[in-house]
Image (cartoon, rainbow, N blue to C red):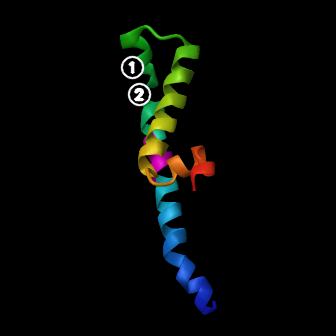
């Protein structure tokens, strides 16, 4: 490994750690789906909305400084 690769290693570790957090968190939500469906009388389609909304919100909160730059590239 050269010096430039070693400089990028902390960034790679942060990205992989963030990805692991997202996967673990979504796994917990998926585990709770039967309880959510029973308690709130949700259909399968509504559970899909719950999963997608939760994933997007959690991802947005995980990378707060990246999100606005992806949505508004013309302001940079």
Q: Residue at the far bottom: name it.
A: 2
Q: Give the side of residue 34 with respect to residue 48, left or right.
A: left
In this rendering, the answer to whether 5 lies above or below 28 is below
40 drawn magenta: no
Question: For mark 1, what is the residue?
Answer: 35
Q: The N terminus is located in which quarter? A: bottom right
Q: Residue at the far front: name it.
A: 75
The secondary structure that dominates the magenta segment is helix
Question: For mark 2, what is the residue?
Answer: 32
Q: Dot 1: few (<14), some (14–19), or many (≥20) neighbours within 10 Å?
A: few
Q: Dot 2: few (<14), some (14–19), or many (≥20) neighbours within 10 Å?
A: few
- Helix or strand or loop: what does disc 1 sit on? helix
Between the residue at mark 2 and the residue at mark 1, the CA separation in whole angstroms equals 5 Å
Residue 55: percent from the left, percent from the top? 50, 37
Instruction: Tell me where the magenta segment starts and ends, as one range.
Output: 21-25
In this rendering, the answer to whether 14 lies above or below 38 is below
Residue 20: percent from the left, percent from the top? 49, 54
- Helix or strand or loop: what does disc 2 sit on? loop
Q: Quadrant of residue 58?
A: top left
Q: The C terminus is located in which quarter? A: bottom right
What residue is rendered at 56% in x and 78% in y? 8
Residue 57: percent from the left, percent from the top? 45, 37
What residue is rendered at 53% in x and 62% in y? 16
Q: Residue at the far left: name it.
A: 39
Proximity of marks 2 and 1: CB atoms separated by less than 8 Å: yes
In this rendering, the answer to whether 35 lies above or below 72 is above
23 drawn magenta: yes
Q: Give the side of residue 15 with respect to residue 35, left or right.
A: right
Nearer-the-camera pick, 70 or 63: 70
What residue is rendered at 47% in x and 61% in y? 17
Residue 4, which numbered label?
none
| Label tally | 2
């Amino acid at each position: 490994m050269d010096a430039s690769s070693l400089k990028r290693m902390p960034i790679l570790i942060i990205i992989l750690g963030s990805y692991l957090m997202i996967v673990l968190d979504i796994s917990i939500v998926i585990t709770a789906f039967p309880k959510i469906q029973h308690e709130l009388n949700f259909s399968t389609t509504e559970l899909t909305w719950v999963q997608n909304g939760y994933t997007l919100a959690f991802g947005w909160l995980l990378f707060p400084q990246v999100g606005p730059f992806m949505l508004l590239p013309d302001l940079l």
